[in-house]
Amino acid sequence: MSNKKRMPIGIDDFNEIITQNFYYVDKTGMIKELLDNWGKVNLFTRPRRFGKSINMSMLRNFFEIGTDKSLFNGLDISKETDLCEEYMGQFPVISISLKQVSGSSFERAVDNIRSIIGREAQRFPFLLESGQLDEDDKWILRRIRRGEGMLDDSLYDLSRLLCKHFGKKVIILIDEYDAPIQNAYEKGYYDEMVGLIRQIFGYALKSNESLFFGVLTGCMRISKESLFSDLNNPKIYSLVDEGCDEWFGFTNYEVKKLLDDYDLNQYYEITKDWYDGYRIGVMDIYCPWDVINWCDQLLTSADKTPENYWTNSGENSIINRFAWMSEDSDRYDLEVLSEGGYVDKKLNFEQSYKDLYSSVDNLWSVLFAAGYLTQRGRNEDGTWRLAIPNREIRRIFADQIEKWFMVKMEGGLRELYGAFDEGNAEKIEKCINTCLKESISFMDGGNTEEQKESSYHMLLVGMVKGRRDWVIKSNREAGKGRADIIIIDRLKKEGTVIEVKHTDDDKQLEAKAAQACRQMKDMDYREYFLGFQISKIKEYGIAFCGKECRVLRG
């Protein structure tokens, strides 16, 4: 493996990836398509971790004056010799990312933006010695570099100064343009931030004679009325547009090649099952963050079990919010989605953050734009056919919905705990069935019998973990096997063993619960408690089918 390139985990600098021997999936064809389908201002909306930042870095390294042209040797764009001759290394480039703009107040967020633009201006110290700039120009530049002066026109002024020095128009790249808007909405200064960003973009990207073209990326397309009202119709590349649809995320061909390059072909099907399934324009796309992390795990770890890498890269409270706002019909839709089906919904691509959570209808659009759902085509009535893209996202839904379910069932769980205290199997069964009726089919997750049984097992573990005076052990060695759930009541000095079974036939519930009871006896799970001062031991066999269970006491 020493001669293999490293996986570029967490690296979004194109120059570093190429020069430091990291694996690069060639997306330079985006340059030609961007120029061929000319737009003065171009907006790309993609979910998090879909390669937005690395593509912006690639664009800067291609177009910027003084670039190392050898970075592109052997890449697809190098075959376009005329294009490279005309455009490579020919333009001043301003490149900023607003990803890290935050702050509990508008003033703090403004300071963040000043610092970001100021640091970008510091990349051009030669302007302070330029014979093309007069003293007034240099005074303006010094203030921008120090984060002083008017913020509204700072990008405009910087582009004007670069254009004046080089005698060439400027390319402006703004990564994660909507991050300050989202943070402002959450912190309570939305209107002020929208007004500021509108002004900055208006000066820099409209009626700017120094601008060659601009590119913006973000997760959401903020409505023209609230943000882009000062721009001349930016060219939009959204999740449903065919233009540039293959340049963010990995195609099936690219994933197969990556696996082949590292002799990991045998993992293709599981990679596809877990991380493929997005439809962008007309292309089937994998989440690149997942694929890179998964391949790194395969190469460096003995554990070959796929993980939810995307979950760990951001915040997933949107699903919880959806669950709380949803009505019965929406939960039915979630059941259909969880079972691999689709739902038809109207999508609004021009929302403001103010409107995102005003209704469940808007939340469908948010789930789609954020990457939790993908499209499978458009219907004649204008609605879109939506589906969960892959197993990873299905698991994210399951985890978040389960958390919501536990909170919602808090009152019912108290009754369940009382039933366990009484040792009343019939009452335990009634309480669990009541809770199951309020749940959705994510609790019946998986395709195999083992996966389905595991889903109910984890659901039950979540239920009993809410009792503070209980110690819960899951899948612990006991007797001659492994007990599903063991409960130790620290106050009453009592022990409980639970064995979980699943069936697709509700007529087999009784038999499955009885089988669980026999298993506990045959495997002598009670032996687990020999080292504890336990006065009483209870055993329960619990069988699940859909939203129904049967509980027998062993």
Image (cartoon, rainbow, N blue to C red):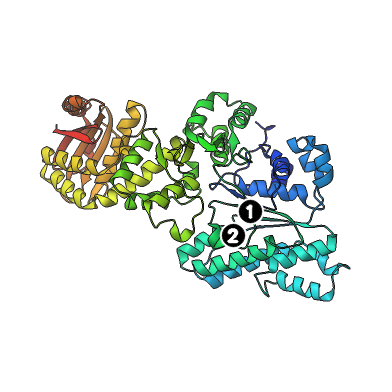
**Considering the numbered disc 2 on the image, is that residue within a helix, a strand or a loop?**
helix
Taking depth in this image into account, of 232 and 186 the one nearest to the observer is 232
**Which residue bears the numbered disc 1?**
234
Q: Which mark is residue 193?
A: none
Alpha-carbon distance for marks 2 and 1? 8 Å
Whether residue 12 appears in this view of the structure is no
Q: How many marks?
A: 2
Q: Amino acid at mark 2?
A: Phe
Q: Position of residue 273 (x, y in %)?
A: 48, 30
Residue at figure coordinates x 49%, y 31% from the top left: 304
- Please report contact status of discs 2 and 1: CB closer than 8 Å, yes or no: yes
Whether residue 344 appears in this view of the structure is yes
Q: Amino acid at mark 1?
A: Pro
Circle nearer the N terminus (2, 1): 2
Q: Position of residue 433 (x, y in %)?
A: 19, 39
Q: Is 206 placed above or below 68 here?
A: below
293 left or right of 523?
right
Q: Residues within 10 Å of mark 1 (few under 14, many from 20)?
A: some
